[in-house]
Image (cartoon, grey):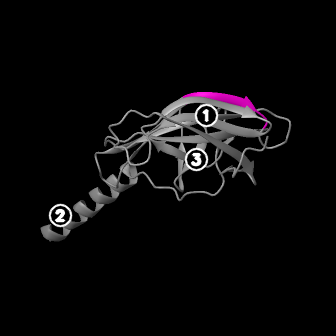
Amino acid sequence: MYKYLAGIVVVVAILFGFFFFYKPVHAPSNAAASGSDPKNATYTIEGTPVTLVNGTASEPAAPGSASQITTTYFGNEATGDLNGDGVPDVAFLLTQSGGGSGTFYYVVVALKTAQGYEGTNAVFLGDRIAPQTTEIRDGEVIVNYADRNPGEPMTAKPSLGVSKYLLIKNSMLVEASTPTK
């Protein structure tokens, strides 16, 4: 009799703990969440939605892992209309690190809508680069930064000037094959 009672108490305790402490993992949505400003919107990095809160997001590197993947607003903000609606949008850089030596840089765009800012996908720029400027000109995002020359080790100081040109197509940030102007 006591074995059954003890079993029931254990099951009730497990259910109680599950009910009060379980945090569900939400399936990724194809639509990015809108935020009141670009530092509080959702961006998609490498296929994973990342929601910034005051410019920062942190998630476990793996389920149950102590290591964190941290995404941070870096800056280099530029403002201008990127989707042709006459409303200024914002382009800027994010960094993402997972506890190792790498700091991965991405460019994103926050498209201004009636509901707030809607984040785009992120376009990878590089690991441990030296960002210079970000600008919006004629509906195009231009990111200038220094990277390493091909074959140089990651310990080398970035010295190769790079310009990346990007456009918004169907609400997605894509690399332009050549500058539009």
* Real-space CA distance between mark 1 and mark 2, rounded to the nearest whole angstrom: 58 Å
Is 16 or 180 nearer to us in this picture? 180
**Does residue 85 appear left or right of residue 23 in this picture?**
right
70 sits to left or right of 142 = left
Determine the image quadrant of residue 162.
Answer: top right
Distance Cα–Cα, label 1 vs label 3: 10 Å
- On screen, residue 61 above or below 95: below
Say whether disc 3 or disc 2 marks the residue closer to the N-terminus.
2
The region drawn magenta spans: 75-81
Placement of 113 over or under 20, stated as above or below: above
Question: For the residues marked 3 and 2, what is the alpha-carbon distance in whole angstroms?
Answer: 53 Å
Disc 3 crowd, CA 10 A, few/some/many (<14, 14-19, 20+): many
> Callout 1: 10 Å neighbours few (<14), some, many (20+)?
many
Q: What residue would you read off at disc 1?
A: 92
Q: Secondary structure at mark 3?
A: loop
The residue depicted at 53 percent of the width and 59 percent of the height is 27
Magenta stretch: helix, strand or loop mostly: strand
Chain-order first, disc 1 or disc 2: 2
The quarter holding residue 165 reads top right
Q: Which residue is mark 3?
A: 122
To which residue does mark 2 refer? 6
Residue 127 horizontal side relative to residue 131, left or right: left
